[in-house]
């Protein structure tokens, strides 16, 4: 919501920020468009640009707080509060404030830009698994757009972009990655993303509506082979457990390649993982020291798998294990060796 000069010009719902029935943008008729009832200095349509920015997951450029609050966009300078009128050159938090940004509170005539970072942030909503991806194949008010295996989007029962499912060719260069979040009592504080090696957001979700408290969501997408980082955030710095309810998250690359999870953290937690079709980093006779407490869904093809876990000298078996098909958790600081 935007309250400029004590007047509400409009408001919008963040992705996942409320019920589907209220998802959208509202603009006061006095600040909409450029003619008729539009009133200066908000008569150039920028209120709509700003509110659609919120609808596409952008925060105010000053992060709605002092210099410690960010809008999570790398290329927008920190600012301590909103700017009004056209305060070009105003300095706060050691930066010249970007008063020309659509997500500030400047007069319409003063605003003329989103940054590349903001653009990426918005476009991420339309990536595979993105919150507003469905919009890409909305039929609007016309005839339904047919789903094809070369329309460049994951639709129908495809498991990747134009691949998988029963109609398209199998996906050969990606693996299904899933995110499961069991919400605590404040889903509206929780959001997450997955970034690739180029720091591009390839999946994202949240913040979620409060009716989801205690409930679970599952989002999956077929990620091309590569290295990714999953980041999860909590606005109130109390993680998913256990200050405001008991929640947790699980992430998994299907077919036993990687799984991890968490629950207790403060404002954020990250897990870096590899999407691949082979265990190139671990195998018989090799040692693997895991600094991040990853655990692997090994899923052996036989009914059991013999594992030995050694101390760091790799001499004394700490706890020889025989596990059935399933998951074994490997604690940090120990070596895992297949025998
Ligand atoms: Zn606003």
Image: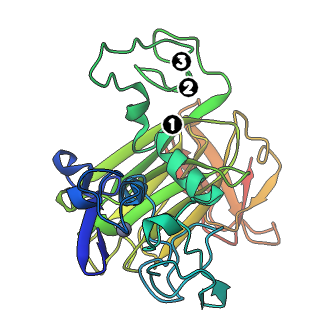
Q: Earlier in the sequence, mark 1 or mark 3?
A: 1
Residue 235 place in picture, x, y as percent: 39, 75
Q: From the image, tell me which residue sits under label 2.
A: 161
Q: Are marks 1 and 2 in contact (CB under 8 Å)?
A: yes
Q: Find numbered disc 2 in the image and state the secondary structure of the residue it sits on.
A: loop
Rate crowding at label 1 as few (under 14), some (14 to 19) or many (20 or more) other CA atoms within 10 Å: many
Q: Earlier in the sequence, mark 1 or mark 2?
A: 1
Q: Which residue is painted at 34% across and 57% down in the image? A: 14
Q: Quote the CA–CA distance across marks 1 and 3.
A: 13 Å
Q: From the image, tell me which residue sits under label 3.
A: 151
Q: Is mark 2 within 8 Å of ligand 1?
A: no
Rate crowding at label 3 as few (under 14), some (14 to 19) or many (20 or more) other CA atoms within 10 Å: few
In the rendering, which numbered label is found on residue 128? 1
Camera-side residue of 221 and 9: 9
**Quadrant location of residue 222?**
top right
Rate crowding at label 2 as few (under 14), some (14 to 19) or many (20 or more) other CA atoms within 10 Å: many
Q: Quote the CA–CA distance across marks 1 and 2.
A: 8 Å
Q: Considering only vertical position in the picture, is 244 above or below 310?
A: below
Q: State whether residue 325 appears in this view.
A: no
Residue 87 place in picture, x, y as percent: 54, 82
**Quadrant location of residue 224?**
top right
Q: Are marks 1 and 3 in contact (CB under 8 Å)?
A: no
Residue 75 place in picture, x, y as percent: 66, 67
Q: Considering only vertical position in the picture, is 167 above or below 239?
A: above
Q: Which residue is painted at 53% across and 47% down in the image? A: 124
Q: Quote the CA–CA distance across marks 3 and 2.
A: 9 Å
């Amino acid at each position: 919501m935007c309250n400029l000069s004590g007047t509400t010009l409009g408001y919008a719902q963040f992705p996942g920020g409320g019920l589907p029935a209220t998802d959208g943008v509202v603009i006061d008729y006095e600040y909409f468009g450029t003619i008729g009832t539009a009133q200066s200095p908000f008569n150039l349509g920028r209120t709509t640009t700003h509110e659609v920015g919120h609808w596409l997951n952008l925060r105010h450029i000053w992060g709605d707080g002092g210099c410690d609050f960010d809008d999570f966009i790398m290329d927008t300078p920190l600012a301590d509060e909103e700017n009004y009128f056209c305060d070009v050159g105003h300095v706060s938090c050691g930066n010249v404030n970007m008063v020309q940004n659509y997500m500030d509170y400047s007069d319409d005539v003063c605003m003329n830009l989103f940054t590349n970072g903001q653009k990426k942030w918005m476009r991420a909503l339309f990536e595979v698994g993105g919150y507003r991806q469905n919009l890409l194949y909305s039929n609007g008010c016309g005839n339904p757009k047919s789903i094809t295996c070369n329309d460049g989007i994951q639709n129908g029962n495809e498991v990747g972009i134009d691949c998988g499912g029963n109609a398209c060719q199998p996906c050969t260069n990606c693996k299904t990655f899933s995110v499961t979040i069991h919400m605590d009592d404040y889903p509206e504080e929780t959001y997450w993303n997955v970034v690739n090696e180029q720091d591009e957001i390839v999946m994202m979700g949240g913040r979620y509506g409060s009716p989801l408290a205690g409930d679970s969501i599952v989002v999956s997408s077929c990620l091309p082979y590569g290295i990714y980082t999953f980041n999860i955030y909590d606005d109130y710095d109390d993680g998913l457990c256990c200050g405001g309810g008991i929640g947790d998250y699980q992430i998994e690359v299907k077919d036993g390649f990687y799984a991890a999870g968490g629950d207790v953290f403060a404002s954020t937690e990250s897990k870096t993982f590899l999407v691949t079709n082979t265990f190139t980093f671990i195998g018989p006779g090799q040692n693997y020291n895991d600094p991040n407490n990853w655990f692997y869904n090994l899923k052996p093809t036989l009914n059991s798998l013999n594992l030995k876990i050694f101390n760091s000298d790799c001499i004394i078996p700490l706890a020889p294990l025989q596990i059935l098909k399933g998951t074994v958790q490997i604690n940090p600081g120990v070596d895992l060796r297949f025998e």
